[in-house]
Amino acid sequence: MIWYASAGPKVNGQWSPWGEWGDCSVACGTGKAKRMRTCNNPSPSGTKGKYCPWSNVDTKTCYMPDCPSKIYKMPIQFHSKLYNMSIKYPSKFYKKSIK
């Protein structure tokens, strides 16, 4: 007798609840925030189970305090890099003479 593995019944995937909103993409001004979800409630299975429809990412506009100047409207990651560099190489950031 030969036994064959069955793929199981068709189960279409369903979305998990949305996750928390992430940080705003900018330190000041108008940016974007996003949240995510996964197709695992349940996951699609069987030979014809379908993946969840639509997108797993949701975005919204976020508003941070106004920038003091257009020059400072940079992503948060860039601000962090500048801060870390200013600690590592202070003379390059603070050694400016005023004439």
Image (cartoon, rainbow, N blue to C red):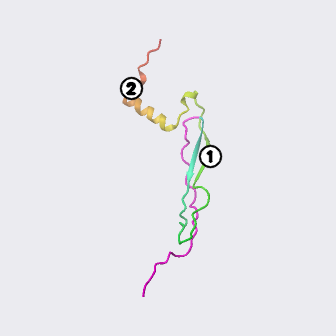
Residue drawn at x 46%, y 80% as measured from the top left: 4
**Frontmost residue, 76 versus 11:** 11
Residue drawn at x 61%, y 60% as measured from the top left: 53
Name the kind of residue labelled 2 in the image. Answer: Pro
Q: Which residue is mark 2?
A: 90
Indicate yes or no whether the magenta region holds residue 16.
Answer: yes
Residue drawn at x 55%, y 28% as measured from the top left: 71
The secondary structure that most of the magenta stretch takes on is: loop
What is the distance, in whole Å, between disc 1 and disc 2 at their CAs? Answer: 37 Å
Mark 1, other Cα within 10 Å: few <14 / some 14–19 / many ≥20 = few
Image quadrant assignment for residue 65: top right
Count the marks. 2
Name the kind of residue labelled 1 in the image. Answer: Lys
Q: Give the magenta part as a residue range.
A: 1-28
Above-or-below relation of 14 to 78: below
Residue 77 percent coordinates (x, y): 48, 38
**Frontmost residue, 23 versus 54:** 54
Q: Which mark is residue 46?
A: none
Image quadrant assignment for residue 41: bottom right
Taking the view exactly as shown, the residue that stands out farthest to the front is 2
Above-or-below relation of 80 to 90: below
Q: Which residue is mark 1?
A: 60
